[in-house]
Image: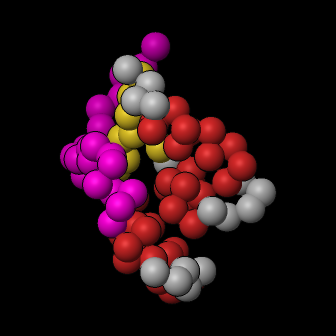
Amino acid sequence: MADLFLDTDVAFDLVSGREPFSVQSKRLLTLHSLEEVSFSISSCSILNLIYLSSQTYKLSNWEIKLTAFLKSCHWLDTSKKARFSRP
């Protein structure tokens, strides 16, 4: 099973159904439901998703939608400093 790392925009498209982007996101949901892919998300994206859902776009039932989505994801701790090497 492939693990897909979702950025905040793609994750929000999945949660919100935001058009026209959700059309492609629905393909990811299909693959996820068939257990062909799993989702990973940055822990930093969670607060952004809460803000976008509740304040910016004011989604109805955002708590339910976001909770269901987050339960289907692996959360990655990205708060630690990343090390970059030069080529």
Residue displayed at 44% across by 25% down = 36
Side (left or right) of 37 relative to 21 = left
Vertical side of 43 occupied by 61: above or below: below
Side (left or right) of 49 relative to 19 = left
Looking at the image, how many numbered discs can be counted on the residues? Answer: 0
Expressed as whole percent of the image width and height from the top left, the position of residue 60 reads 52, 83
| Residue 35 figure quarter | top left
Vertical side of 5 occupied by 13: above or below: below
Expressed as whole percent of the image width and height from the top left, the position of residue 29 reads 53, 43
Expressed as whole percent of the image width and height from the top left, the position of residue 5 reads 43, 37
Task: Answer whether residue 80 is magenta in the image.
Answer: yes
Residue displayed at 67% across by 64% down = 18
Vertical side of 76 occupied by 4: above or below: above
Answer whether residue 4 is visible to the viewer in this image. Answer: no
- Magenta segment: 67-87
The residue lying toward the viewer, choosing from 81 and 41, is 41
Q: Which residue is most to the front?
A: 34
Side (left or right) of 40 relative to 24 = left
